[in-house]
Structure formats: C-alpha cells, structure tokens
C-alpha cells in the first residue's frame, strides 16, 4: 500500500507541474492574455460549481468500499446513475450563473465544453475512489496522470509543430475534453472488469442517504472553491479579459505549488481522524511534525519568488514579464496561508468541526468579494491579488485559533520539532 501511495504522489509531482508550467504557459503565450483571460474566467466559474457534480459522493465511496469491498458492483451502478443526474443539475446551475453574469455567445461556446470536462474529471475521481477503496494503487497511479499525459501529448503536438500558427483557445479546451473522456472510459472499463459491473441501477433512498451525510462537506468545498477562484470572475467584470489573463499567468505558479500542500494533506485526514479520538497529545505532535516543515517550505518559496519575480516571469512569459511581476509578488505570498489551511483545515475536518469551517469560509468569501470591489477599480489585477491574499490569511489564522481553542493544542505545536520528537514520531529506533 505504501508503495502504491508513493507512486501516486511521485507521478503527480512529475506530470502536473509539466502541465502547469509547460502546456498552460505555452497555450497562454500562443493565444494571448485576452483570449486566455476569457478562458480562465469561464473555467473558474465551471470549477466553482463542480462540487454539484459530486456532493461528497467520492469521499463516501472511498471509505465505504474500503470497509465493504463486496458492495462495489451494487453501489457503483447506483452512484453512476446519480452522477449523471448531478451533471444535469450542475449544467442548469452553470447556465443560470452564466446568464446572471451577462455572458454572451463567446463565453457559452467555452462554458459548455468546460462543463463536460468538469463532469468527466469528477467521474474519473469517483472511479479512482473505487481503485483506492480496493487498494489497487497501481491502477490509481496510472489513471491519476493519464488525463494530463494525454493533454500534454495533444497540446504539445499543437503547440510545438506547424499547427501552432492556427492554435486557438478552443483547441486547448477540446484537447482537455478528449483527454478526460479517454481516461474516464479506460477507468470505467477496468473497474467494471474488476468489480463485475453489468448495468446501471437507481436507488433513491441510497442516494438520499449519501447526499445527506455528505452535505456539510460539500458546502465547505463549494465555499472554499468560491473564495479561491472568484477573483478572475470579478476581475473580468470590472477590468476586462486582459486583466484576467494577467492574473491567470501570475496565479499559475501558486496553483502548481499548492498541489504539494494538497498531496501532503491527503494522507493526513485518516491519520487525524484516528488520533482525534484516541490521543490529543499525539495529534499535537503530528501537527508539529508537519506544520513547521511546510511553513519553512512555503515561506522560503514566497521569499525566493519575490526576489526572483522578474526572471521567473520573463522565463515563462518572455517580453510580457512586467505585466505579471507586481501581481505575482503579491499572489505567491498566498502559498504560506494555503499550506497552513491544508494542515489545520484537515485537522478540523477530521475533528468534525465542519460548521465552524463553513462559517469561516463564508466570511472569507465575503471578505474576498469586498476587497476585490474596492481594489480592482484602483489597482486592477494587483488589487485582485491582494483580495485573494486577504481571504487566505483570514482563513489560515481563523483555523489556527479554532484548532487551539477547541482541541486544546499546546503552543509548542507551532514550534519546530526536536530531533528526539522526530525519532519518536517516525518510530526510528
């Protein structure tokens, strides 16, 4: 199992930065800030609403199949049907949101395929939860990077061949849809063979139970996605496509860095869930072991990126670097509170403090919108970066305070672990 988890992490760390910093950067340089800003805005709208495609079903399924693997075929038929119905709900909400935002034909021509892409991505994550529940980590490793590998191949052929002269943002979107579709079909065929799935079914009481149990978590994911991804939507409304494109370029490296914090948080959730019920002191020690290295990593990355902001942006965007540098210097500082949030947010989620986390997320969203409305007219993309950083800092500090109050963590939790503690926690004799 440890070997399988290692390969999942390693393959994602290798492949996804190549997508972020190679293909996405190449696409933005090829189509320009205005076209990419339009795409990035519509993509974030589709991304914010994608919790409607899952509503916590994937997390429920991972735990359930791990405990009762013999139920996989029975449950999969019903959950796949539920996913299709959720796609209809998601599409309606996306359409309504686009109409409220005053989107026209250009936006809708991107929104529809991006909604399909989000559905296929959600389907892949659900199918992967079956691999994880059955401890088929080798298949999970392969499926976890198959979509990005296909996108890298397709987009690379278009960006690094004579086709580049005709490359446009629609080709970029269609390549994503095709890659997700091929990956989803592959995952479905494999898991169907492993589980004996023969047909889809529908069980309304079963679906309602799943949705009711996962509702608080689904709300938290929706709110966090909103305060993390609403900035380019507001920026485009108040400042135009080009500003949204500049924000997207500056945001990209933060997005890639955040993947590291996310991958660290994934194994923390089951560990915290067990420790919160047995030994709070061990919970504090585990948090101390993870928190200080992540804090040191994030602070170092933020400082280095601020010092070398101009060379980094020049390397990525060539002659347009001056547009991105001021935004990048602000937004990359968000890596510090994001790392803190992934640690303490995971701890509070494992402890069942979802009501408080949802209240914090609502406050962070309102703060983000308010700061955006004040600063975008004055500072453009830089103002939006400050709004994002404000929301991230609020969420990180609120979670630290809540964790210390409710879980009674000692202040030493925030200090670096001693060598003796490291040996004890890692069980090295």
Image (cartoon, helix red, strand yellow):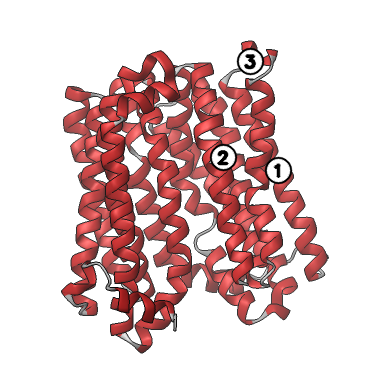
Q: Residue at x 54, y 53 (%)?
A: 53
Which residue is identified by label 1? Answer: 181
Q: Identify which residue, 85 or 369, lies in the foreground.
A: 369
Q: Which mark is residue 115?
A: 2
- 195 left or right of 251 in image: right
Residue depth check, mark 3 versus mark 1: number of the one nearer the observer: 3
Single out the residue that lies furthest toward the bottom.
278
Which residue is identified by label 3? Answer: 164
The quadrant in which the C terminus is found is: bottom left
Q: Secondary structure at mark 1?
A: helix
Q: Earlier in the sequence, mark 2 or mark 1?
A: 2
Q: Secondary structure at mark 3?
A: helix
Q: CA distance from mark 3 to mark 1?
A: 24 Å
Q: Is residue 299 above or below residue 100?
A: below
Single out the residue that lies furthest toward the top.
165
Residue depth check, mark 2 versus mark 3: number of the one nearer the observer: 3
């Amino acid at each position: 199992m440890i070997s399988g988890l290692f390969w999942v992490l390693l393959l994602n760390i290798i492949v996804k930065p190549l997508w972020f910093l190679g293909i996405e950067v190449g696409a933005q340089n090829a189509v320009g800030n205005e076209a990419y800003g339009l795409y990035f805005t519509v993509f974030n709208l589709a991304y914010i609403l994608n919790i409607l495609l899952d509503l916590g079903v994937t997390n429920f399924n991972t735990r359930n199949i791990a405990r009762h693997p013999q139920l996989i075929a029975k449950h999969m038929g019903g959950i796949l049907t539920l996913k299709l119905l959720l796609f209809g709900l998601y599409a309606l909400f996306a359409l309504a949101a686009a109409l409220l935002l005053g989107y026209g034909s250009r936006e809708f021509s991107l929104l529809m395929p991006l909604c399909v892409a989000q559905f296929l991505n959600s389907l892949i994550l659900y199918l992967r939860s079956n691999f994880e529940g059955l401890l088929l980590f080798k298949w999970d490793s392969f499926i976890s990077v198959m979509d990005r590998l296909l996108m890298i191949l397709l987009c690379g052929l278009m960006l690094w061949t004579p086709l580049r002269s005709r490359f446009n943002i629609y080709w970029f979107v269609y390549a994503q849809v095709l890659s997700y579709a091929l990956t989803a079909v592959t995952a479905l065929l494999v898991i169907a063979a492993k589980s004996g799935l023969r047909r889809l079914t529908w069980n309304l009481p079963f679906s309602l139970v799943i949705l009711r149990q996962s509702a608080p978590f689904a709300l938290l994911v929706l709110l966090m996605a909103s305060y993390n991804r609403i900035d380019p939507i507001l920026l485009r409304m108040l400042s135009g496509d080009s500003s949204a494109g500049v924000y997207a370029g500056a945001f990209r490296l933060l997005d890639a860095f955040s993947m590291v914090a996310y991958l660290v948080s994934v194994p923390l959730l089951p560990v915290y869930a067990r420790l919160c019920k047995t030994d709070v002191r061990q919970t504090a020690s585990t948090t101390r072991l993870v928190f200080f290295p992540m804090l040191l990593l994030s602070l170092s990355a933020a400082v280095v990126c601020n010092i070398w902001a101009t060379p980094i942006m020049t390397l990525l965007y060539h002659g347009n670097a001056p547009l991105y540098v001021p935004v990048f210097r602000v937004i990359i500082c968000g890596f510090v509170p994001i790392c803190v949030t992934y640690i303490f947010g995971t701890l509070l989620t494992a402890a069942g403090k979802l009501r408080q986390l949802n209240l914090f997320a609502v406050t962070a969203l309102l703060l983000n919108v308010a700061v955006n409305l004040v600063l975008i007219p004055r500072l453009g993309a830089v103002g939006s970066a400050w709004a994002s950083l404000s929301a991230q800092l609020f969420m990180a500090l609120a979670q630290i305070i809540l964790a210390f109050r409710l879980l009674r963590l000692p202040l030493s939790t925030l200090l670096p672990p001693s060598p003796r503690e490291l040996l004890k926690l890692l069980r090295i004799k």
